[in-house]
Amino acid sequence: MVQTNFSKLLAFDSRILKLAKKSNPDLIVDGKPGAKRRSSSEQQLTLFKSATSGLIGVDEVGRGCLSGPVVAAAVILPRVAKSSFLAEELSELDDSKALSQKQRERLAEVLRANCLFAIAEATPAEIDQINILQASLLAMRRAVDNLLSQIENSPAQLLVLVDGNQKVKGLTLEQITVIQGDSHSASIAAASVIAKVYRDGLMLELSKKHPVYSWHSNKGYGSKAHRAAIAEHGVTKWHRLSFRLFDSE
């Protein structure tokens, strides 16, 4: 049977869980082939042996935008048999940036129908107040908290996989950071797709109220047309004032 991208991503998650069972201090958190381990600290890599019942993948989108919130999603994938219909439906799952809009929207629909997930935001005002990194982590924490609120049983055995190299402050669950996780972990890739499709839809709705900024096409990123509109029309409450909004800055 041909190995799909989804099966490769699932295999990565499976390896993480196996290492979690062993509390392996040598867990490689950089998914890039041949990459060296970024951190060997026990504080960063120690896993609870109990963290074997499932994974929460968490990722954010919109960090580099000039406008709009930063959005995070947290996802728990169901157990998926390799030859199942769901595995076939998710065969193209990948980092949302590597997918077309059509692929993302189709995958997001499948994921939302079959996964436990939650979405959260950090506003432009929060981004300006605490900086984009901290706001991204805040959105991630909110997404995980929202997800856990949907789970009746104790979530103590869940392990959180966080895209990037920064842990999410304030979580009670054990977590592992995975560099380029959205390209290597099925759980994180699922979160990236759900967050991306949600945020794109939000920017499309905001564009109807503020059409001069072309958010329907640039999604809040700093395109030439977007910056020109800012220079001509000024900013809205959705713009991040702490970002470089003008080409001359």
Image (cartoon, rainbow, N blue to C red):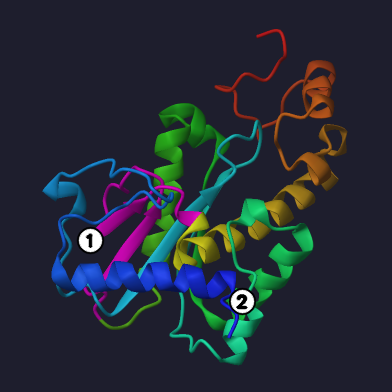
Callout 2: 10 Å neighbours few (<14), some, many (20+)? many
Q: Quadrant of the C terminus?
A: top right
SS at badge 1? loop
Left or right of 122 on screen, residue 23? left
Left or right of 139 on screen, residue 104? right
SS at badge 2? loop
Instruction: Confirm whether residue 117 shows in the render.
Output: no
Total marks shown come to 2
Instruction: Confirm whether residue 125 shows in the render.
Output: yes
At 66% from the left and 35% from the top, the residue drawn is 67
For the record, the magenta segment spans 154-182
* Residue picked out by circle 2: 90
At 41% from the left and 53% from the top, the residue drawn is 31
Q: Amino acid at mark 1?
A: Glu
At 32% from the left and 70% from the top, the residue drawn is 15
Q: Is residue 217 magenta?
A: no
* Residue picked out by circle 1: 174
Asked whether 141 or 123 is in front, the reply is: 141
Residue 137 picture quarter: top left
Residue at the far top in the pictured view: 248
Left or right of 145 on screen, residue 8? right
At 84% from the left and 37% from the top, the residue drawn is 214
Residue 5 picture quarter: bottom right
Q: Amino acid at mark 2?
A: Leu
Q: Give percent across and percent down for residue 180.
A: 46, 49
